[in-house]
Amino acid sequence: MARIKTENNLTRKEVIVSKAATLFREKGFKAASMRDLAEAVGVEAASLYNHIKSKTEILHELCFSVANRFVHKIDEVEAENSDAIIKIEKLLRFHINEMLHHYEEVYVSDREWKHLSDPYLSNFQNQRRIYRKRFAAIIENGINEHQIKKIDAPTAVLIMLHAISGIESWHRSTQKITAEELEENMISILVGGLVNR
Amino acid sequence: MARIKTENNLTRKEVIVSKAATLFREKGFKAASMRDLAEAVGVEAASLYNHIKSKTEILHELCFSVANRFVHKIDEVEAENSDAIIKIEKLLRFHINEMLHHYEEVYVSDREWKHLSDPYLSNFQNQRRIYRKRFAAIIENGINEHQIKKIDAPTAVLIMLHAISGIESWHRSTQKITAEELEENMISILVGGLVNR
DNA sequence: AAACATCGCTAACACGCGTTAGTATAGTAT
DNA sequence: ATACTATACTAACGCGTGTTAGCGATGTTT
């Protein structure tokens, strides 16, 4: 009988959720079946239900663990006493590094949250909306203090966030520049697009 | 018996494909069922097959009609005799306007192409890869002529393209700025992030 | 060694899916 | 009016889905 291997003191549930992230990224939430997941984990499909309640629960876990990390970060950054442009750069670097090092989860949370079901769905959408407003508010501050050029702050936010999700393409690409180079290039272009001069 | 309404001299097939675009955007390709589509069109599911060969064929049509428009545009822009930065701005404006005025199709082509099946899938991926290389080459030219700052051109491309796909959020947002304002803001930030100064 | 909880298995379920066959109806051309 | 084509319908198919029930095996605690 094939037990789920738990290394690095992960629970079996965490192993499942982690494999699911990979699968959901590759195929999309709907197209990835529990039988696919079972095979990836090395077990029969029914056995998964000893550890998780449902397929959607896996998606919850993924989406909210990612969302929480971003909320905690913006809490931290907002509390800082520094220029708007510094705050924005810190947030961007955090986003970039999340996308670099927790690729599967972040990607899935970004693209597959639509398939959450309803108390969670509206909850997630709210969190996202609020996060973006807080991000926009920082940009707005930067504009008022003339560090950032006069632009529509919500538009700037969506450009930044979506641009970073492009790291997906970097992951898939064959001739990659290093992660550090990628980060610096992105910061240069994105922050460069904001600053007043 | 409920016939499919064809107005603006669209064929019935085009009506189906167009409704499918909306549905695929809302639910995703896998989650949108032929019965959903039939209901949106105002007909029974089986009746759709008088006009289309399969569900995937609809996706082909959508993906390749969008891809072709971009290829034609870059053909046109490359042939021009103008500065790199002008060419890039023209491409970006084209992307933005495609996303503004053919939202459903472009969005679906962008997010759901994974579900194409294989002669078409690799074909589509190739077209995309080549398109991005051509875009990157224009940026490279701009760098060599010192109009654009020294950045990794492929990274710049993925930032641009993904940033524009963020217009999705604009469409969904309630308090929208106008399309024209959106376009100018995006150009200002994106081109501003590239130029040498 | 006995008792207990944890975990994986087989079998099966109800359901929704894309699609096909065959038939009836509506619209168009003769 | 008649013939023909285009289009819609009903019924059904085989298949894959998420999930449950019940049982046996493994691991842990007393």
Image: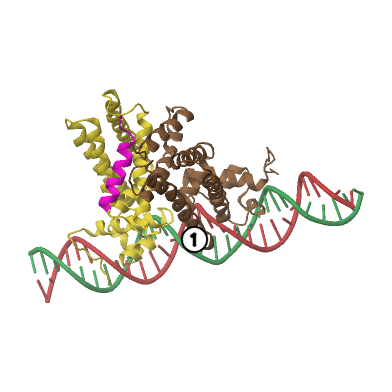
Chain colours: A brown, B yellow, C green, D red
Question: Hey, what amino acid is under mark 1?
Answer: Ser
* Magenta stretch holds residue B191: yes
Specify whether residue B59 is in view: yes
Q: Is residue B140 above or below residue C24?
A: above
Check the image and report above or below for B75 versus B146.
below
Q: Residue at x 38, y 59 (%)?
A: B34
Image quadrant where one finds the C terminus of chain A: top left
From the top left corner, tell me how far across and down residue B63 is, in percent. Answer: 31, 46
Where B88 sits versus A117, above or below? above
Name the residue nearer the viewer: A103 or D13.
A103
Magenta residue span: B179-197
At horizontal 39% and vertical 57% (from top left) the residue drawn is B26
Which secondary structure is most common in the magenta stretch?
A: helix
Q: Is residue B71 visible?
A: no
In terms of image quadrants, where is residue B40? bottom left
Q: Is residue A122 left or right of residue A197?
A: right
The residue at which mark 1 appears reads as: A122
Q: Nearer the viewer, residue A52 or B4?
A: A52
Picture residue at 37% right of the left edge, 57% below the top: B173
